[in-house]
Image (cartoon, helix red, strand yellow):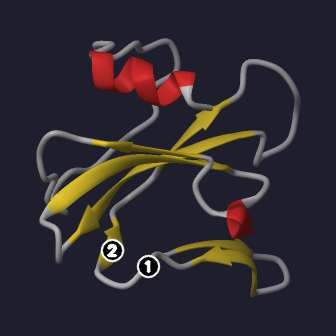
Amino acid sequence: GLAKVDVKKEKVVEQWRPRQHEFLGEVAFCPRTSGVGEDNGYLVGYLLNGKAKSSELVFFDAKAINSGPISRTKLNYMVNFSLHGTFVPGFTPEMTSEVVSAFQNL
């Protein structure tokens, strides 16, 4: 699942749990181009469905994790948990049709 933790208060303030047989990998934070706040952006990750042996690219609004993914895009292949992500300001990844489609669903 996914949790937002207030480290000063040492407590979970929001959380989301996937459906049975779904497992969320590491998420990356992608800031919005406007606005302020440490959670003003999106969390992007891969969701593995172990039963269906399939994966989805999922997007969360970082301000509303409890609401679950705001977009779920099925991939044509399964992504294992060995994938790790890093946000690099100014870096633009290759915009495959699947990535473009996922962003259009936001």
Cβ–Cβ below 8 Å for labels 1 and 2? yes
Quarter occupied by residue 104: top right
Question: Amino acid type of disc 2?
Answer: Glu
Quarter holding the C terminus is top right
Pick out the residue farthest to the front: 52
Q: Which mark is residue 22?
A: 2
Q: Which mark is residue 50?
A: none
Give residue 64's position: percent from left, percent from top. 77, 58
Does 91 sit above or below residue 20? above
Label 1: which secondary element: loop
Quarter occupied by residue 51: bottom left
Quarter occupied by residue 53: bottom left
Mark 1: give few (<14), some (14-19) or many (20+) Cα within 10 Å. Answer: few
Identify the residue at image location x=70%, y=51%.
62
Give residue 35's position: percent from left, percent from top. 88, 27
Q: Is residue 74 left or right of residue 50?
A: right
Identify the residue at image location x=72%, y=69%.
66
Q: Is residue 105 left or right of residue 51?
A: right
Give residue 101's position: percent from left, percent from top. 42, 23
Q: Total label count? A: 2
Give residue 47's position: percent from left, percent from top. 34, 60
What residue does disc 1 label?
19
Question: Amino acid type of disc 1?
Answer: Arg
Label 2: which secondary element: strand
